[in-house]
Image (tube, rainbow, N blue to C red):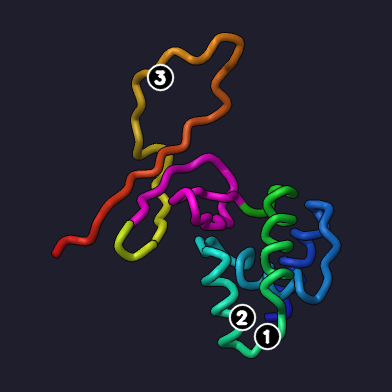
Amino acid sequence: MTDRRDEVERQLRRHGVKPTPQRLEIGMLLLAEPCHMSAEQIIAHMRASGSPVSKATVYNTLNLFSRHGLLKEVAVHPSRLVYDSTTGIHHHFYNVDTGELTDIDPGDIELTRLPDLPPGTSAESVELIIRVRSRS
């Protein structure tokens, strides 16, 4: 556990984030291994483990981690963000019934053409979300 905590602390420092106790606690949940979690899931997990961290601290920390490149925000719905600890370009399956977000390897998607881009722009990346439903 100490090794994982030390690694999370190093990650925070490498990205210019001061490792406060609250940030380390949230970082242990999100950065120790690849995961996808919403703010609500993070808060529920922390409360279940007895953490006194406030909702505002969780949201502020998620925003800070995202701004510093530690997390990627994935907008799965206009009112719902999921935080992804894998920050490189990749694709997702999003199960609209369960809310689960699953990575798709970029090599598993083959795009043969993009539409014409707006004048004066260039493509930075293409990231795809495939929405699925559970079979009844």
Location of the C terminus (image quadrant): bottom left
Which of the 4 image quarters holds residue 91?
top left
| Percent coordinates x, y for residue 81 in the rendering | 53, 55
| Percent coordinates x, y for residue 70 in the rendering | 68, 53
**Residue at point 40%, 17% (across, down):** 115
* SS assignment for the magenta stretch, majority: strand
| Percent coordinates x, y for residue 130 in the rendering | 33, 44
> Residue tagged by mark 1?
51
Q: Residue 103 shows which numbered tag?
A: none
Q: Residue 46 shows which numbered tag?
A: 2
Query: What is the magenta range?
Result: 72-95
Q: Is residue 69 above or below residue 115?
A: below
What is the distance, in whole Å, between disc 3 and disc 1 at their CAs?
A: 46 Å
**Residue at point 53%, 40% (across, down):** 89
- Outermost residue to the left: 136
> Residue tagged by mark 3?
114
87 or 47: nearer the eye?
47
Which of the 4 image quarters holds residue 45?
bottom right
| Three-letter amino acid code at the position of disc 1 | Ser
Q: Is residue 74 above or below residue 24?
A: above
Q: Mark 3 falls on what kind of element?
A: loop
Q: Mark 2 falls on what kind of element?
A: helix
- Mark 3 or 1 closer to N-term? 1
**Residue at point 61%, 66% (across, down):** 30
Q: Mark 1 falls on what kind of element?
A: loop
In-image side of 17 versus 60 (left or right): right
What is the distance, in whole Å, between disc 2 and disc 1 at their CAs?
A: 5 Å
- Pointers 2 and 1 in contact (C-beta within 8 Å): yes
| Three-letter amino acid code at the position of disc 2 | Met
- Outermost residue to the top: 119
